[in-house]
Amino acid sequence: NQTITLTSGVIAVTASVIIDGDLDGDDTPDVILSGGGTSRALEYSSTSTTGIALTVRSLEFADFTSTTAGAGAAIHFFTNSTPSVRGTLTITDSIFHGNSHTGTLANGGAVSVRGGTDFTIERSVFHSNTAGQNGGALHFNNGVIGTVRDSLFYDNQSNATTATTGGGAIG
């Protein structure tokens, strides 16, 4: 496996893109993106009424952190809540572990999806991710429509302190 440590902050996704970390065709991650405990990974955030498509295949996300309100540590995907063309996030055969979101609106320890977005998560593993409020691994809100299938969640945690927040795996 190859490890790439991001040291210059979040990578802004501004157009539709496929990111594939499977170098040998076996549908397992060969590339590890690491935040080294100090960085976020990928972000698409737009108030435009036209969403984009972000596809992540066979990629491992490890040790990313976020203190940005509402933004997941590894992936934050936000499309305008009433878009004319919805955004699309697809994650397959990927692994998310050791990611953490703390601070105000600390939602989505690994992934946060908001607004007019359709998502699909398949054959992926989420473990040991932490959020200060909702969704230790995943957080979805504001018009998000999607499916999670054939995926594994374990040892994720929400540090929520009220009865209306939480969700160790999904919130």
Image: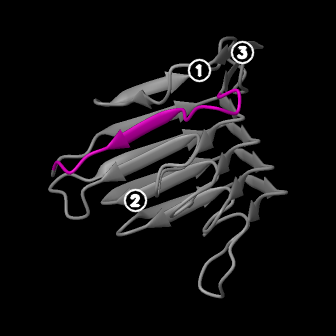
Q: Nearer the viewer, residue 170 or 28?
A: 170
Element under disc 1: loop
Q: CA distance from mark 2 to mark 3?
A: 29 Å
- Above or below residue 44? Residue 18 is above
Q: Residues within 10 Å of mark 3 (few under 14, many from 20)?
A: few
The amino acid marked with disc number 1 is: Leu
Q: Residues within 10 Å of mark 2 (few under 14, many from 20)?
A: many
Q: Which residue is mark 1?
A: 6
- Which residue: 46% across, 46% down? 76
Q: Which residue is mark 3?
A: 3
Element under disc 2: strand
Q: Is residue 40 magenta?
A: yes
- Which residue: 26% across, 63% down? 81
Q: In the image, which residues are magenta?
A: 35-48
The amino acid marked with disc number 3 is: Thr
- Above or below residue 93? Residue 46 is below
- Which residue: 35% across, 69% down? 143
The amino acid marked with disc number 2 is: Arg
Identify the disc placed on residue 114.
2
